Amino acid sequence: MPRRRERRTIVVLRPPPTQETPVTSASLRPAPPGSGLGVSVHRGDGLVVVSLTGSFDIYSLPGLRGELDALAGTSALVVDLTEVSLIDSSGLSALLSLANRCARTGAVPFGLVCPRRRLRRVFDITGLRDAFVIGADLAAVRAIWEAGGDH
């Protein structure tokens, strides 16, 4: 008599996935350690500087987009990316949207401070380098504006 093959079922038990709530810092506070995006706003001399720290990505964007849109068109606007460790396509899209909104509201200057070569490379690779005034520091952005450069 032929031997019957036994069928064995293997069950792998895994813990249920944890749901992590995206952390945003649209309330203008420092990013919690190890997550999210910190935002601070400095106003003066007809200029608004929004300094970001942490990851500027899809998880940090929902609360931040409204804050950024509210600042567009009020005066010259600079987003400081000095302390940004990561930017994804959502972050790039938000910056492009903000630049376009500033342009539509009466040619209000908009610029980016981006001293990190690795982060500037993202703008080069995506072809967005010429869509922004990008300087290594605030003085460089102002110098480009004064020279009449809008890109």
Image (cartoon, helix red, strand yellow):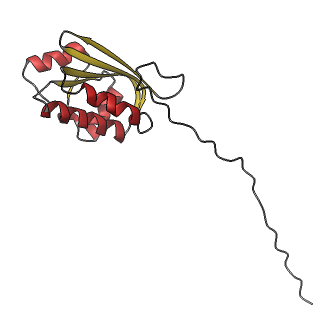
Where residue 131 appears, as percent x and y from the top left, is 18, 35
Is residue 134 shown left or right of residue 105?
right
Instruction: Please say whether residue 144 is visible from this viewpoint.
Output: yes
Q: Nearer the viewer, residue 140 or 25?
A: 25
Query: Which residue: 26% across, 12% down?
Result: 43
Query: Which residue: 39% across, 35% down?
Result: 61
Is residue 50 shown left or right of residue 31?
left
Quadrant of the image occupied by residue 63: top left
Q: Quadrant of the C terminus?
A: top left
Considering only vertical position in the picture, is 115 above or below 92? Answer: above
Query: Which residue: 12% across, 20% down?
Result: 145
Instruction: Please say whether residue 87 is visible from this viewpoint.
Output: no
Considering only vertical position in the picture, is 147 above or below 24? Answer: above
Quadrant of the image occupied by residue 140: top left
Q: Nearer the viewer, residue 86 or 16?
A: 16
Residue most extreme to the right: 1
Q: Quadrant of the N terminus?
A: bottom right
Residue most extreme to the bottom: 1
